[in-house]
Amino acid sequence: NAGVTQTPKFRVLKTGQSMTLLCAQDMNHEYMYWYRQDPGMGLRLIHYSVGEGTTAKGEVPDGYNVSRLKKQNFLLGLESAAPSQTSVYFCASSRGYQPQHFGDGTRLSIL
Amino acid sequence: KQEVTQIPAALSVPEGENLVLNCSFTDSAIYNLQWFRQDPGKGLTSLLLIQSSQREQTSGRLNASLDKSSGRSTLYIAASQPGDSATYLCASQGGSEKLVFGKGTKLTVNP
């Protein structure tokens, strides 16, 4: 039982490049979330999804897009990466209002 | 807008000491209060979840309490061990799927 798996674990991008972060969960959870964690800022919600085919904005959605085409996968896209998007990105999933299960993160650097 | 605060930002104690971590929140209309642990380079692991109707939850050496009227929660760790060294985060959940996180308390337990 893998839980929540994030791909890739590390990535370095140049400003203006695009990329997609993949999150996969095998717990049949309805809810999935994308967070970013920055020093001094804590954990902030980017986008989330309460079910297949649905997405919603969180606290810091600008510059990111998401898709939830399958219940087990939640994709986070950066269309034109900026240095301000250098961060550690975490995906999480939950069954309703139960505790969220987190992946180990993607460390993204944008030069 | 809910704000969650954790003080102190860092705490260092000798092994065997009992300790209390503090969490305060500004909006008492919460659904639950959750405590997480984060080890370096890892995602968050759920420790305890207290429903708004509960006063406390216990798991092994951990005890979390909730006082909605004062906007406070505490995490009590008994007989601390070096393996307890980590960052501890609290998060409140209001009437939605979203969690609001504090910035965490970094705990170091010295042998």
Image: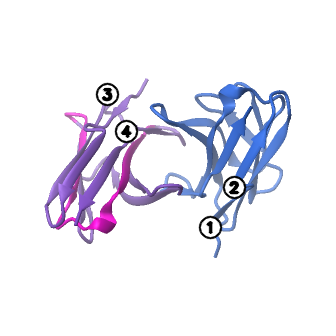
Classify 10 Å Cα crowding around label 1: few (below 14), some (14-19), many (20 and above).
some
**Among the two numbered marks 1 and 2 on one chain, the one whose residue lies closer to the N terminus:** 1
Please tell me the numbered disc located at residue B26: 3
Q: Is residue B55 above or below residue B70?
A: below
Q: Which residue is mark 2?
A: A9
Q: Amino acid at mark 3?
A: Thr
The chain identifier of the residue carrying mark 1 reads A
Quadrant of the drawing holding the N terminus of chain A: bottom right
Classify 10 Å Cα crowding around label 2: few (below 14), some (14-19), many (20 and above).
some
Q: Nearer the viewer, mark 3 or mark 1?
A: 1
Whether residue B74 is visible: no
Q: Secondary structure at mark 2?
A: loop
Task: Answer with left or right where residue B82 lies relative to residue A103.
Answer: left
Q: Position of residue B54 (x, y in %)?
A: 26, 53
The chain identifier of the residue carrying mark 3 reads B
| Boundaries of the magenta span | B69-94
Q: Amino acid at mark 4?
A: Ile
Q: Which residue is mark 1?
A: A3
Q: Position of residue B88 (x, y in %)?
A: 36, 51
Residue at 26 percent across and 72 percent down: it is B60
The chain coloured blue is: A
Distance Cα–Cα, label 1 vs label 2: 15 Å
